Image (cartoon, rainbow, N blue to C red):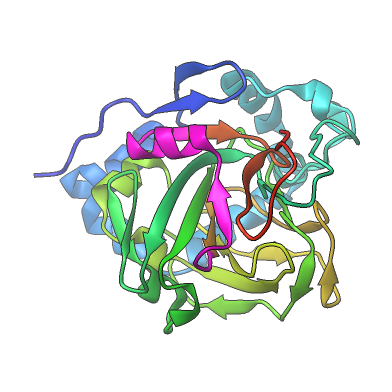
C-alpha cells in the first residue's frame, strides 16, 4: 500500500513560526506516485528526459507567460524583490530563473561564516560516513551512491540539504570563497522532489540527474557542492567560469521544477548553527534565504556570527 503523507511543515527562521507548505501540482504528483494507475506510467514519465524536455520547451515559450500571475498569487511570491517588473518576463522560465534586486539577500561580511547557497528548506546532519544514509522527508540515500564514487575525504563530516520549492528564488550562489574544479555530471532520471514523491519512492536523490563541484577553501576545508535536478529540470545550468570563486558569486540556476542542493563537509571543519541542528534533530526543515549564515568555521576562534 502506498505511503500517504501528512501536511509538510517547516520552521520559518525569520518569523519563528511553524508553517504548512503549499505544494504546486499536488494532485498530479499524488496520482503519479500514489495511485496504482499513475505508478504504471511513472517509468515513462520520469525515466527519461523526454517529458522534461517537452515541458522545458513550453516553459521557455511565450505561451507559458499566462501561468506567471497565477503562480505568484498561489505561492504568495514577493514581487518587490524582482530585478525587473512582472510583466517584463518573456516566458515562465524567464520568471522562474529571475534575478533579484541588489541588496535583498544581505549576508555577513565575516568570512568565518558559511552562508546558505540558496533559498529553500534546510536539514543538516553531523558525523556522516560514505555509506551513511541521509534521510530527507521519508527517503534515505547513501552518500556513496549519491556521488557515484568513493568519498572517503568526507568520512565523519557533515551534510546540509537545501530543498528548493517552486516559490523560491532558483539561482544558487557560492557559500564561501575558494578554488574549484570543473563540475562533475552524474547521469540520472527526472523524478519529482515534491514531498509526496519523496515519501513514495526510495532513493530519488541517488537516481536523479545531478552535478557536483569540489571547492577547496581556507576556512572550511574541501566542500562538495551538489545540484540535484528533478521533474521539469532537463538541465542544471552553471553560470560561473574560472577556478577562483568569491562568496555569494552566482554559481548557476535551475529551470522550472523542484530541485535540491546537497553540501558535504570534511571532518572538524564547520559547526552548524544551533537552531538548524535542533530543528533537524526533530526532522523539521528550516526555511532559509540565500546568504544567511548556516554554519561557522571550526578551525579558529570566531567573531559573533551574523545572519
Residue 165 is at least partly visible in this image: no
Q: Is residue 304 above or below residue 71?
A: below
Residue 172 is at least partly visible in this image: yes
Q: Nearer the viewer, residue 91 or 191?
A: 191
Residue 217 within the magenta-colored segment of the rendering:
no
Residue 28, x across and y down, in percent? 37, 38
Q: Residue at x 68, y 71 (%)?
A: 215
Corner quadrant of residue 254: bottom right
Residue 35, x across and y down, in percent? 20, 42
Corner quadrant of residue 251: bottom right
Q: Is residue 209 left or right of residue 112?
A: left
Corner quadrant of residue 96: top right
Q: Nearer the viewer, residue 296 or 19?
A: 296
Q: Is residue 179 above or below residue 281?
A: below
Q: Is residue 204 above or below residue 29?
A: below
Q: Residue at x 64, y 60 (%)?
A: 299
Q: Nearer the viewer, residue 41 or 184?
A: 184
Residue 87, x across and y down, in percent? 85, 28
Q: Is residue 95 left or right of residue 47?
A: right
Q: Residue at x 78, y 74 (%)?
A: 179
Location of the C terminus by quadrant is top right
Q: Residue at x 73, y 51 (%)?
A: 112
Q: Nearer the viewer, residue 131 or 137?
A: 131
For the record, the magenta segment spans 265-285
Amino acid at each position: 500500500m502506498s505511503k500517504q503523507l501528512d501536511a509538510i511543515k517547516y520552521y520559518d527562521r525569520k518569523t519563528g513560526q511553524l508553517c504548512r507548505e503549499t505544494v504546486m501540482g499536488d494532485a498530479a504528483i499524488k496520482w503519479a506516485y500514489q495511485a496504482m494507475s499513475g505508478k504504471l506510467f511513472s517509468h515513462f514519465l520520469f525515466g527519461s528526459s523526454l517529458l522534461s524536455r517537452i515541458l522545458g520547451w513550453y516553459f521557455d515559450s511565450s505561451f507559458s507567460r499566462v501561468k506567471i500571475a497565477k503562480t505568484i498569487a498561489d505561492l504568495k511570491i514577493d514581487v518587490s524583490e524582482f530585478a525587473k517588473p512582472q510583466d517584463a518576463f518573456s516566458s515562465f522560465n524567464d520568471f522562474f530563473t529571475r534575478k533579484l534586486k541588489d541588496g535583498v539577500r544581505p549576508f555577513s561580511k565575516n568570512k568565518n561564516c558559511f552562508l546558505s547557497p540558496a533559498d529553500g528548506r534546510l536539514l543538516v546532519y553531523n558525523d556522516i560516513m560514505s555509506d551513511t544514509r541521509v534521510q530527507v522527508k521519508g527517503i534515505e540515500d547513501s552518500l556513496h551512491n549519491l556521488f557515484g564514487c568513493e568519498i572517503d575525504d568526507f568520512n565523519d563530516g557533515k551534510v546540509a540539504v537545501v530543498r528548493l520549492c517552486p516559490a523560491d528564488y532558483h539561482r544558487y550562489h557560492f557559500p564561501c570563497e575558494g578554488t574549484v574544479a570543473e563540475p562533475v555530471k552524474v547521469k540520472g532520471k527526472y523524478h519529482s522532489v515534491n514531498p509526496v514523491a519523496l515519501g513514495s519512492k526510495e532513493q530519488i536523490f541517488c537516481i536523479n540527474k545531478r552535478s557536483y563541484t569540489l571547492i577547496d577553501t581556507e576556512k572550511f576545508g574541501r566542500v562538495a557542492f551538489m545540484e540535484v535536478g528533478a521533474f521539469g529540470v532537463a538541465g542544471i545550468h552553471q553560470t560561473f567560469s574560472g577556478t577562483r570563486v568569491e562568496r555569494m558569486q552566482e554559481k548557476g540556476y535551475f529551470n522550472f521544477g523542484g530541485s535540491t542542493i546537497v553540501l558535504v563537509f570534511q571532518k572538524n571543519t564547520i559547526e552548524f548553527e544551533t537552531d538548524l541542528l535542533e530543528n533537524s534533530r526533530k526532522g523539521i526543515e528550516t526555511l532559509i534565504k540565500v546568504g544567511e549564515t548556516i554554519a561557522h568555521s571550526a578551525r579558529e576562534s570566531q567573531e559573533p556570527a551574523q545572519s
